């Protein structure tokens, strides 16, 4: 009996805690998904299908986690042999986590490519995303071949590659987006304020997933007990919420007038006396000299995406583009230009 208690504390205790946290984060994912579909009438169909796929995988991840815990703690209560080995329901966790992380990272890699115009940056992100995806699948397969929890250290290399690859990919996405966004500041109060909010959300969502992955691999290497599984069961939900919070943040910008920086002037000469905030259009213009690309304009007030082929002909001057050349803007109607197919999605951070 004492052996069963020891095994439960060392292995199934952390798994149970991880499943609890997984279910808490699932509740947040459900709420985020509801908000997305409740306010995403302007999003393209493929974006909605993408979110449905992620949400479906997220639900499966939680269901299999609960099935595993019921099987071990109820059906095989006190069975040391059952508590010491993984089952196919347990193996679905690293596999589903790798799938969710992989597609979310590739989505953000696509954003980086469209926003910055750098194919090299996107390829680097996609490379690490693919590495962690394959290593995660490999970790699941290894868990089938060597089901004993205490022997999981036999496939340490592939597990380390999975988790560190995931963390590196998240850090790269965050750094690339933050570096690009910082260059888009124009000196105008309204646009800089929105860019700062995007940067903060990017850092928060990107660093949370990378930090949890790093803690996971450290605990995996540092102790033979299964403490790392607490964080492992959280990863899938963190990636899902990272994606959904990024998409849903677009809607919150519409209601940012109440949190406008205090240094903003209360009114403009000749402006409306109704007290309504003028519509702001944010336009993250491309830096550097690049050939013409179709553009997508994102109106923060309406969140409507409009394709404008060849909005700028020839080469773009960064300073002029950021100040709204080619648009009929006044005072604080500033634009920050997004490339085609960015589809109103800045990785708002």
Image (cartoon, rainbow, N blue to C red):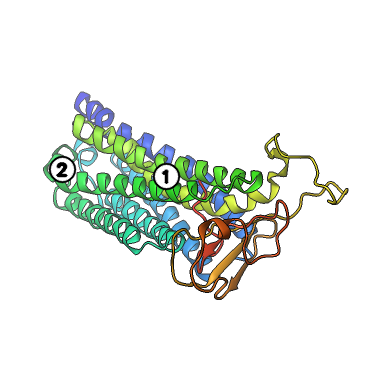
Q: Residues within 10 Å of mark 2 (few under 14, many from 20)?
A: some
Q: Which residue is mark 1?
A: 206
The residue shown at (42%, 37%) is: 20
Provide residue 41's location: percent of width, then percent of height: 64, 65
Asked which secondary structure carries label 1, the reply is helix
Pointer 1 or 2: first along the chain? 2
Number of numbered callouts drawn: 2
Q: Give the mark toward the camera: 1 or 2.
A: 1
The residue shown at (58%, 58%) is: 283
Farthest bottom residue in view: 309
In this rendering, would 217 be left or right of 248? Answer: left
Q: Residues within 10 Å of mark 1 (few under 14, many from 20)?
A: many
In this rendering, would 24 be left or right of 64? Answer: right
Asked which secondary structure carries label 2, the reply is helix
| Location of the N terminus (image quadrant) | top left
Provide residue 266's location: percent of width, then percent of height: 79, 40
The residue shown at (51%, 41%) is: 200
Farthest top residue in view: 2
The disc at residue 99 is none
Provide residue 128's location: percent of width, then percent of height: 27, 54
Q: Are marks 1 and 2 in contact (CB under 8 Å)?
A: no
- For residue 274, above or below residue 303: above
In this view, the residue in front, 7 or 340, is 340
Note whether residue 93 is visible: yes
In this view, the residue in front, 205 or 202, is 202
Could you give the CA–CA distance between mark 1 and mark 2, rounded to whole angstroms?
25 Å
In this view, the residue in front, 70 or 311, is 311
Note whether residue 15 is visible: no
Q: Which residue is mark 2?
A: 156
């Amino acid at each position: 009996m004492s052996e069963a208690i020891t095994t439960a504390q060392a292995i199934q205790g952390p798994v149970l805690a991880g499943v609890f946290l997984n279910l808490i984060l699932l509740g947040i994912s459900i709420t985020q998904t509801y908000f997305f579909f409740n306010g995403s009438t302007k999003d393209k169909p493929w974006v909605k299908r993408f979110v449905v796929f992620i949400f479906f995988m997220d639900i499966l991840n939680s269901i299999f986690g609960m099935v595993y815990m019921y099987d071990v703690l109820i059906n095989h209560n006190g069975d040391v042999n059952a508590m010491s080995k993984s089952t196919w329901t347990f193996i679905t966790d690293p596999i589903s986590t790798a799938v969710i992380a992989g597609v979310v990272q590739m989505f953000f890699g696509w954003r980086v490519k469209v926003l910055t115009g750098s194919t090299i940056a996107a390829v680097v992100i996609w490379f690490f995303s693919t590495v962690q995806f394959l290593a995660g699948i490999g970790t699941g397969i290894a868990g089938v071949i060597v089901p004993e929890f205490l022997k999981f250290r036999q496939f340490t290399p592939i597990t380390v590659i999975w988790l560190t690859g995931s963390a590196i990919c998240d850090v790269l996405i965050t750094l690339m987006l933050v570096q690009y966004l910082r260059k888009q500041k124009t000196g105008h109060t309204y646009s800089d304020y929105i860019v700062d909010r995007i940067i903060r959300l990017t850092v928060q969502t990107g660093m949370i997933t990378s930090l949890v992955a790093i803690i996971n691999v450290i605990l995996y290497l540092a102790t033979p007990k299964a403490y790392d599984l607490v964080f492992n069961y959280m990863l899938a939900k963190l990636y899902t919420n990272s994606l959904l919070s990024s998409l849903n943040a677009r809607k919150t910008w519409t209601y940012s007038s109440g949190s406008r920086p205090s240094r903003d002037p209360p009114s403009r000469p000749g402006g409306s006396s109704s007290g309504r905030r003028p519509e702001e259009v944010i336009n993250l213009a491309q830096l550097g000299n690049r050939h013409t690309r179709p553009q997508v304009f994102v109106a923060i007030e309406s969140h409507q995406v409009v394709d404008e082929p060849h909005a700028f002909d020839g080469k773009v001057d960064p300073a002029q583009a950021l100040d709204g050349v080619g648009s009929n803007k006044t005072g604080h109607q500033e634009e920050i230009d997004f490339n085609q197919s960015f589809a109103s999605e800045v990785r708002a951070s």
